[in-house]
Amino acid sequence: MKLLKERILTDGKCFEGGILKVDNFINHQMDPKLMYAMAEELATRFAGSGANKILTVEASGIAPAIMVGYIMGLPVVFAKKKVPSTMEGVLTAEVHSFTKNRNYTMCVSSDYLHSEDRILFVDDFLAYGNAAVGVVELVAKGGAQIVGMGFLVEKAFQHGREVIEQMGIRVESLARIASLDGGVITLAE
Amino acid sequence: MKLLKERILTDGKCFEGGILKVDNFINHQMDPKLMYAMAEELATRFAGSGANKILTVEASGIAPAIMVGYIMGLPVVFAKKKVPSTMEGVLTAEVHSFTKNRNYTMCVSSDYLHSEDRILFVDDFLAYGNAAVGVVELVAKGGAQIVGMGFLVEKAFQHGREVIEQMGIRVESLARIASLDGGVITLAE
């Protein structure tokens, strides 16, 4: 997606250890107009997917997910990264975040994942695919199916796509980063 | 706002200790069409506020905030509840959450709060107003001004409105809960 790629090259910053910061337009300060345009693009790509529900993970997945849900006319569920004390009937999966170097428990109430659900997972970043693997586990525990996964930015050099595609799940991303070597952002195409 | 009030009475559930659960349409599973309608209402109420930026707090404030930002054509910043290791120049405030019975550090990068900023704060719930007080502290540290605070649901019996209004800040909410006594949801008007 041209608009996003240009914005990444203009406003993105990279740091040691393959970290791409896009926190002035995606995951701290957000540009709602760009967010809507990205959501439209994901909605178009998954128009024929048969999805009946959008799933994301707090916090930075929520903005793209709610807009995809709005455009596609589907409910949006966000998985939490801490099990709330007031929640009963919780589905959980353990996830390791390489970016933050810690584990967390991803959870969704069993009220919001059913056997008839066909889930489109939406998130801001695809890196190693660990969160995506957690989502696959959660969705399986709820007896639901995943029809696809859509990401704003894919760090292609961390190979999360391969992990997901090996499970037979379709992956779409709007900008693929080939490398962040030498502090330079290189796009994949 | 009639649509929200009806939905709260239909789908909201209350629990011991003044807890209102609206997690099937606001803060776990979200109804994007309702979310957009609520954002439109907040945008209308604050149309003349002079806001140039929307501020919210992760996670459940993000969905209403991104939509208010989209409708008003303003950038949206979400404060984080944990200081990221990769963030420099962080503005912080300590907040006690009564709902979760724990303290957290609310933070925003100083890159996204400037002296010329006129902030509209948007969040899903107003209870005791503790998060709002933290936001006032953060915004003051950034040298910015608050032009108003808009909430989807206000638990009027927890008096957060008084706390905020005493600081001279305008408060709007779309549904006011007068009481949750005896497991019954009673709206304020």
Image (spheres, coloured by chain):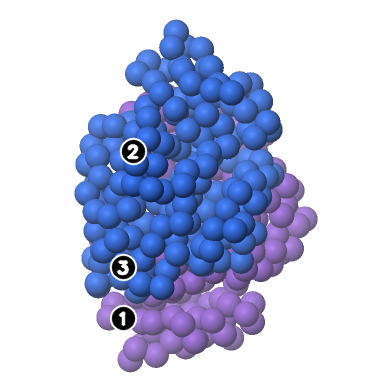
Chain colours: A blue, B purple
Q: Is residue A134 above or below residue B117?
A: below
Residue type indicated by callout 3: Gly
On the image, numbered disc 3 is attached to which residue? A143
Separation of residues labelled 1 and 3 (CA atoms):
28 Å
On the image, numbered disc 1 is attached to which residue? B15
Pointer 2 local density, CA inside 10 Å: few below 14, some 14–19, many at least 20: some
**Quarter the C terminus of chain B occupies:** bottom right
Q: Residue furthest top?
A: A182
Q: Residue furthest right?
A: B48
Q: Nearer the viewer, residue B130 or A104?
A: A104
**Secondary structure under the numbered disc 3 in the rendered image:** loop
The x, y position of residue B49, in whole percent, is: 73, 53
On the image, numbered disc 2 is attached to which residue? A163
Image quadrant of residue A72? bottom right
**Quarter the N terminus of chain B occupies:** bottom right
Q: Nearer the viewer, mark 1 or mark 3?
A: 3
Q: Nearer the viewer, mark 2 or mark 1?
A: 2
The disc numbered 3 marks a residue on which chain? A
The x, y position of residue A136, in whole percent, is: 32, 53
**Secondary structure under the numbered disc 2 in the rendered image:** helix
Disc 2 with disc 1 on a shared chain? no
**Secondary structure under the numbered disc 1 in the rendered image:** strand
Residue type indicated by callout 2: Val
